[in-house]
Image (cartoon, rainbow, N blue to C red):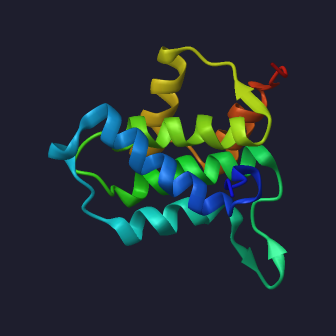
Amino acid sequence: MSEDIESEDPADAIYRFALCYHEREFGSRYAIIGDDKLRSACGRPFHTFGGEVLFPTLAGRAAALLDAINQAHAFTDGNKRTAWMCLVYFLARSGYSIRADDAEAEALVLAVVKGDVELDFVSSWIAARLSVRRSQ
């Protein structure tokens, strides 16, 4: 019986993607040093408080994910790139892509890491660049 990835818990799917992406891009020499931190970061977009979803929009969840993975600093290297690719993966799972070139993406991620931008700004930035993915 094959696993239906679409019905899989999204936080678990993002976590596994992060591990696979990081291993493929950076190899084992830049190992994970914060597994629990990474798991928690992957779940942040789906958190609730008092029964209310904390990040009700897709862009808000994507912004929370980018911020959380960067803050977790779960790998010895490649945290920023892994965080960005997890954002791209999360959006793709949701049927969207993001229109941003490498320089724009890098500038946003660096601003997030430095704490130069608020989560609302990141969410708006993402929302302005969302595009529905075409079926293939």
Q: Quadrant of residue 98?
A: top right
Let me know if residue 107 appears in the view.
yes
Query: Which residue sits at x=69%, y=60%?
Result: 8
Residue that appears at 67% across and 53% down: 2
Residue 115 visible from this viewpoint? no
Percent across and percent down for residue 135 are 84, 22
Question: Which residue is at the far front?
Answer: 1
Decide: is 110 above or below 120: above
Residue at the spot x=70%, y=65% of the render?
46
22 or 60, nearer to the observer: 22
In the rendering, at what x and y percent does residue 114 appear? 39, 44
**Vertical relation: 71 (above or below) 77:** below
Q: Is residue 65 left or right of residue 123?
A: left
Q: Is residue 90 placed above or below 10 in the rendered structure?
A: above
Quadrant of residue 73 within the rendered picture: bottom left
Image quarter (top left, top right, bottom left or bottom right) of the N terminus: bottom right
Residue drawn at the location 83% of the way across and 58% of the way down: 56
Outermost residue to the left: 29
64 relative position to 74: left or right = right
Quadrant in which the C terminus is drawn: top right
